[in-house]
Amino acid sequence: MLRGSSFAIAAAVCFGATVPAVKYFSRDVGSWSTAALLYAGAMLGALRPSRAKGEKRLGRPELVRLATVAVLGAALAPALLATGLRHVDGASASLLLDFEAPFTVLLARLLYREAVSRRVVVALAIMTSGGLVLVGPTLAAPRIALGSAAVVAAVLCWALDSALTRPLASLEPTRVVVGKSAIGGTLALTIALALREPLPHLAAAGGLLACGVVGYGVSLRFYLLAQRNIGAARTASVFAAAPFFGAAVALAAGAPPSGALLAAGGLLALGTYLLATERHEHAHEHGATEHEHMHRHDDGHHDHVHTEPGFSPSREHSHPHRHEGVVHTHPHADDEHHAHEH
């Protein structure tokens, strides 16, 4: 839980802090051009060798899923975000991104039967209320209301992306990030050229590429590692801290605070705290299975024997291995070994 939550927090910091910067650099750049530049940067940020040797790689069965999440998360979502940022201040847009947590938790429940306790339901209700407090006053201003709707639509696309990405989390993350970025970025670039969006200035292009490296490449890699450890719903719950980093940066840069912004921030912070500190424990059964994924031998679930000299139980490695059936009780999240129904 601690390991997965640490990855999710790192992803949240990288993504959240770049939202105000994306608003600044995309002012005179088309929405689809913005999406293409962000995910070109993401691909650059992911082009690094994996430290884990022998990690399971992307295969043909995963390509359709990868293409789907690329269209949703690497083309449509950033284009919608760029559209919304033209009409909404950076702090408000950052907090609106917190809708991703409720969306992703509900999708994880529907698609994978991940656990949703009463504490989670209360937290989601509080967070939704915070979002409504933020959006409500904008309804009288059509442009701002349109911008808010575009940001929430982007969040829904990213929630679908996050939920559908969960089965890819056991694969080598660099290949997933590069593949998603290449497909989504190419699609966004094709649409930008078809719409004849103007070419961005060098400074804007460089700024958006930098935002893509940190907020979409490095962040997505951390997000995949978090999903591998704690599942889709809990990763989204901890990642819900991202909007607060974005709002803090926007306010520090001079965005005007308001009563609605502060009230929404308080509600969203409370909901995020309730989600991130939930404890899940019950008796559960692991059926006998054989699979391949990154694992360690000090996690209580991998007790097969390695005979190579100098093998360390805390070293991550990947190879096909078998689990015998067992019933036990311990705190857990919805990782690859705890995908049981609730």
Image (tube, rainbow, N blue to C red):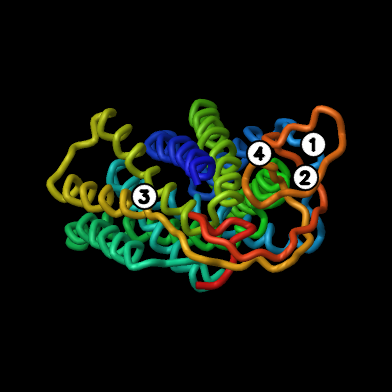
Q: Residues within 10 Å of mark 4 (few under 14, many from 20)?
A: many
Q: Amino acid at mark 3?
A: Thr
Q: For the view shown, which residue lies furthest in the right direction?
A: 308
Q: Residues within 10 Å of mark 3 (few under 14, many from 20)?
A: few
| Residue 9 marker | none
Nearer mark to the viewer, of 4 and 1: 1
Nearer mark to the viewer, of 4 and 3: 3
> Disc 2 on helix, strand or loop?
strand
Which residue is disc 3 drawn over? 277
Which residue is disc 4 drawn over? 43
Q: On the image, which quarter does residue 119 sit in?
A: bottom left
Image spot of residue 96 (x, y percent): 33, 53
Q: Amino acid at mark 1?
A: Lys
Which residue is disc 2 drawn over? 318
72 or 174: nearer the eye?
174
Q: Amino acid at mark 2?
A: Ser
Which residue is disc 1 drawn over? 53
Q: Amino acid at mark 4?
A: Met
Q: Is residue 148 visible?
A: yes
Image spot of residue 173 (x, y percent): 68, 44
Q: Along the polypeptide, which appears first: circle 1 or circle 3?
A: 1
Q: How far is the residue under mark 1 from the one under mark 2?
A: 7 Å
Q: Residues within 10 Å of mark 2 (few under 14, many from 20)?
A: some
